[in-house]
Image (cartoon, helix red, strand yellow):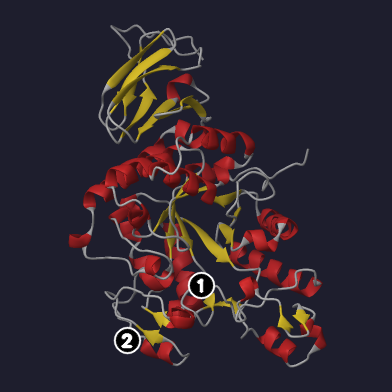
Amino acid sequence: MHPSYPTPTWVYESVIYQIFPDRFAIGKGKTVHDKAQLYTSRGGNIVEWNVLPKAKPHAAHVNDFYGGDLWGIVEKIPYLQDLGINVVYTTPIFLSPSNHKYDTVDYLTVDPQFGGNQAFKRYISDMKKNGFKLILDGVFNHLSKDHPWFKKALKGDKKHAAKFTFYEDGYRSWNNFSHMPEWNWEEIEVREYLLGVVEHYLRLGIDGWRLDVGFDLGYVNNALIASKVKSVSLEKYVVTETWNFPAGWEIVDGIMNYHFRETVLGYLKGERINIAQALQSAFDRTKNIYGCWNILDSHDTPRLATVLPDKELRKLAIVLQFTYPGVPMIYYGTEIGMEGGPDPENRAPMIWDEQRWDNELRDFYKKLISLRRKEIALKVGTFEVLNDEPLVFFRRAPHVLDSIVVAVNKGEHTKVSLSVPDGRLLAGTPFVDLFTGEEFWIVGGVLRIDIPKKGFRILRVTNKVKKGYDQYKRIY
């Protein structure tokens, strides 16, 4: 049995908000035109904020810029606080020719398009003052062909050529994209350089790293990075990007759980009969499930509202995102109903005109965020399926009175009778719906509930003291 790192304690309390910096907000009262020189001088095109991004031949859309920066994120702290999230994950912010910045030229320079190192210091300072944890995107599998070391390697410098993999007719690049050559992690200088970057930003105050294409980095390099992260502090967090079944990656704190996304969306779209077995299997087999990210969309997928236009079904997906073990991750704008197909349509500028928001959906998110941050069972409770269809599961908490039952029904209104396998639950204990206030009573270990059409229940065990008598006075 291999030992693993303890999950940082704050992760259990977290709700993550993902931001694509060029598309979130422009700070200091500027427009993209005020900043035009920062883009056009480097071959970029500026685009008005209200123009939706569209794919261009040869992926030329990666050169389209809207002007978002770190100053803008700082100015939107009140919005983030009102929403209730407490962790911000930004896609890459380091010097790079593209709008997505996944092709790094200099890891130690925050791109001037985002405000540079000065804006980054302010970002760290102000976000920390307001209680946010910060996660950066680490692109350590590949880099930009404009990186100084790679340019020297192309010119025949043997010392630098060893840092990459060259063939007779080219070089190894990520996904065969020639503008993103891959690092040779087997070279000591490469490892020391990249691990130095990891440590540098942790010591500047960030709380963790998300590792881009962690599956390409490989298990050993994930382990090296995790070791460096944990050497700084066991309270620092490292999550890797994989698109596979979540088990087997205990060397890091968690993965981006795309298996959760595919399972939930496939179920709600009618592509699979039920999801109980898949969710139970992933929980049982994934030792670090509580550190994994529960994802429904991201910068790499179509937006949730586009995949599930039926808002009632979408709400069921969101309920599962916040009640299944793991850390909920909201992609910016999803909370107000933003739509978008594949990249780059899913990377549209954030809508700041409140008249265009789905405020009912945003309030729904706020309620779930509040519950996730408040309820112990949703942070650390077990996951035990009580019924396959409709899906009902038990989040068993250490203390019986903190436990929660969650029911998700994508079909017609129905009633179910459930055996809740917890001998600590006394007859006559009510389960209270945290959204509606309705009560359902357990008798003989059996809980009978009804679930509305395309509806859900989040039911919390509640102790009703009757005439001063507390039946749970000696139950633990």
Q: Looking at the image, tell me whether mark 2 or mark 1 is earlier in sequence order.
A: 2
Q: Which residue is mark 2?
A: 34
Q: Amino acid at mark 1?
A: Ile
Indicate the position of residue 84 as horizontal and vertical percent values.
35, 49
> Which quarter of the figure has residue 178?
bottom right
Give the CA separation, mark 2 to mark 1: 20 Å
Q: Give the structural element (helix, strand or loop) at label 1.
A: loop
Q: Amino acid at mark 2?
A: Asp
Q: Residues within 10 Å of mark 1 (few under 14, many from 20)?
A: many
Residue 208 vs residue 377: left or right?
right
Looking at the rendered image, the quarter that the N terminus falls into is: top right
Please tell me whether residue 105 is drawn above or below residue 418 in the rendered image.
below
Q: Residues within 10 Å of mark 2 (few under 14, many from 20)?
A: few
Q: Which residue is mark 1?
A: 93
The residue at 39%/51% (across/down) is 85
The residue at 35%/69% (across/down) is 348
The residue at 43%/44% (across/down) is 271
Indicate the position of residue 294 as horizontal and vertical percent values.
48, 47
Evaluate whether residue 112 shows in this view: no
Residue 231 vs residue 47: left or right?
right
Q: Are marks 2 and 1 in contact (CB under 8 Å)?
A: no
Of 288 and 399, nearer the camera is 288
Q: Check residue 314 in the rendering and tell me which mark sits there, or answer none.
A: none
Please tell me whether residue 224 is drawn above or below residue 369 in the rendered image.
below
Indicate the position of residue 359 as horizontal and vertical percent values.
22, 52
